[in-house]
Image (tube, rainbow, N blue to C red):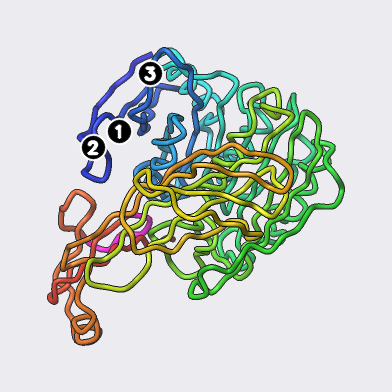
């Protein structure tokens, strides 16, 4: 199998040691590209989990790496992320072949071939391979759960769905933990049944029944920590499935066709949860044999890299989520190793609003019944850029009559408006806006 590798220079956003690698394999007579992210903690002496992160229809591997970003989580949790690139369909759009439009590309076999190639190159835990993706990438993850279940431990879909008829042909060879995150006002992949997709509630019921979970989910309202995003989140979980499998659904009420928590937010993007963090919290509990530790201790997971402007009184946010736990939750967190006062709360997740820069970790945690485990980290930095942090008066003065000078891509190359690509809009007042317009 022919294989091409290109090691990219990591951007200043990441510390030395991490690797972002552009590579290719030849499959089915086609060059199939992908982007690999290997955290600095990786050592060939220790087998690590592998997460497939599939892009949406018309999108690409690079955009998904930024839009549905797992890299900061990978840096602390130690898993490898692969962002595969789809092929061009007969309309000229990048896609994953999930039964639409007469495509003949075998993306299931390509995924398995890429999996085998990565296992031959890196120390991968074969029992901890997961799949997630946006939209068409979510459909792809469901198809892998149905057709490659002997290799996939759990899946999560963001704005994806299942085609009509898949219920009849889907029969994984082990209980399959499934998470779906979906907006009720999604204009692209309907939350309700459409002419070619099942409804999201019916999909959740299908997997809950397949896994022999409880018939009725536990439903909790996620705290509305961002009242400006125009939507709220409801968490549904079907528990007690075979091998400890659960089914989870984040119902984003009034949410659109978006990835919650992304920094490239558009209308209908929920900011009360971070989809990437919730997906890894879910994946981390399972291997291909089911729940990794059937006697799960409560866990506190801290995450969220944020910045504070040197000249603005706007707090950064660090989030602590609790799993396998009974409220109230009591924890102590530290900033740069210095312990802060103990916090007891029933809110899950709990948001720390702060003006203090530094590295944030959880030092101790217990719920109502047990002493729990801790994981994750967060980083708050100070931004001293006058472009990113204009003085308050400058913000007011330049809200009108500013002119667009040019549009550039992430490499600084001037370009024109393109959907499904990260672009930087540079104005004559010195301000820069990051935008990604999803088609």
Between the C-alphas of marks 3 and 1, the distance is 16 Å
Residue at the spot 49% in from the left edge and 47% down from the top edge: 302
- Mark 2: few, some, or many residues within 10 Å (few <14, many ≥20)? some
Choose top left, top right, bottom left or bottom right for residue 145. top right
**Total numbered labels:** 3
Left or right: where does residue 369 sit relative to residue 31? right
Q: Is residue 63 visible?
A: no
| Quarter of the picture holding the C terminus | bottom left
Q: Could you say where residue 367 lies in the image, as x and y percent from the top left?
A: 67, 47
Left or right: where does residue 208 sit relative to residue 182? right
SS label for mark 2 = loop
Q: Could you say where residue 1 lies in the image, as x and y percent from the top left?
A: 38, 13
Give the magenta-colored segment's residue range: 416-421
Q: Nearer the viewer, residue 388 or 431?
A: 388
Q: Nearer the viewer, residue 271 or 210?
A: 271
Left or right: where does residue 415 sit relative to residue 435? left
- Mark 3: few, some, or many residues within 10 Å (few <14, many ≥20)? few
Marks 2 and 1 close (CB-CB < 8 Å)? yes
Q: Which residue is mark 1?
A: 20
Q: Is residue 425 visible?
A: yes
Say which of marks 3 and 1 sits in front. 3
Q: Which residue is mark 2?
A: 10
Q: Which residue is mark 3?
A: 43
SS label for mark 3 = loop
Left or right: where does residue 92 sit relative to residue 388? right
Residue at the spot 43% in from the left edge and 20% down from the top edge: 118
Which numbered disc, 3 or 1, marks the residue that appears first in the sequence? 1
Q: Which mark is residue 358?
A: none
Choose top left, top right, bottom left or bottom right for residue 234. bottom right
């Amino acid at each position: 199998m022919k294989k091409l590798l290109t090691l990219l220079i990591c951007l200043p956003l990441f510390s030395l040691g991490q690797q972002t690698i552009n590579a290719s394999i030849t499959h089915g007579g086609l060059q199939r590209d992908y982007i690999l992210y290997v955290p600095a903690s990786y050592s060939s002496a220790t087998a690590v989990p592998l997460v497939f992160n599939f892009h949406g229809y018309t999108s690409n591997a690079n955009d998904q790496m930024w839009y549905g970003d797992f890299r900061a989580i990978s840096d602390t949790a130690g898993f490898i992320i692969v962002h595969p690139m789809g092929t061009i369909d007969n309309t000229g759009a990048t896609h994953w072949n999930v039964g639409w439009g007469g495509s003949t590309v075998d993306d299931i076999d390509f995924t398995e071939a890429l999996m085998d190639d990565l296992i031959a190159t890196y120390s991968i835990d074969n029992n901890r391979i997961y799949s997630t993706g946006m939209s068409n990438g979510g459909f792809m993850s469901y198809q892998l759960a149905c057709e490659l279940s002997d290799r996939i431990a759990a899946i999560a879909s963001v704005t994806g769905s299942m085609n009509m008829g898949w219920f009849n042909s889907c029969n994984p060879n082990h209980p399959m933990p499934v998470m779906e995150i979906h907006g009720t006002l999604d204009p692209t992949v309907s939350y309700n049944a459409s002419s070619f997709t099942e409804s999201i509630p019916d999909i959740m019921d299908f997997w809950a029944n397949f896994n022999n979970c409880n018939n009725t989910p536990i439903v909790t309202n996620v705290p509305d920590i961002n009242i400006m995003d125009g939507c709220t989140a409801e968490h549904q979980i079907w528990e007690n499935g075979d091998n400890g499998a659960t089914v989870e659904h984040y119902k984003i009420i009034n949410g659109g066709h978006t990835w919650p928590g992304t920094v490239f937010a558009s209308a209908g993007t929920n900011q009360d949860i971070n989809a990437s963090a919730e997906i890894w919290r879910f994946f981390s509990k399972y291997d291909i044999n089911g729940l990794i530790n059937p006697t799960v201790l409560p866990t506190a997971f801290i995450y969220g890299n944020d910045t504070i402007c040197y000249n603005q009184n706007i707090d950064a946010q660090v989030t602590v989520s609790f799993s396998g736990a009974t409220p109230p939750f009591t924890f102590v967190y530290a900033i740069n190793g210095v312990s802060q006062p103990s916090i007891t709360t029933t809110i899950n997740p709990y948001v720390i609003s702060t003006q203090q820069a530094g590295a944030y970790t959880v030092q101790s945690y217990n719920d109502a019944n047990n002493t729990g485990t801790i994981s994750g980290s967060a980083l708050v930095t100070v931004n001293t850029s006058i472009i990113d942090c204009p003085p308050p008066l400058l913000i007011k003065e330049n809200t009108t009559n500013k002119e667009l000078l040019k549009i550039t891509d992430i490499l600084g190359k001037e370009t024109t408006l393109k959907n499904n690509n990260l672009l930087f809009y540079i104005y004559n007042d010195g301000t820069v806006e990051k935008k990604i317009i999803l088609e």
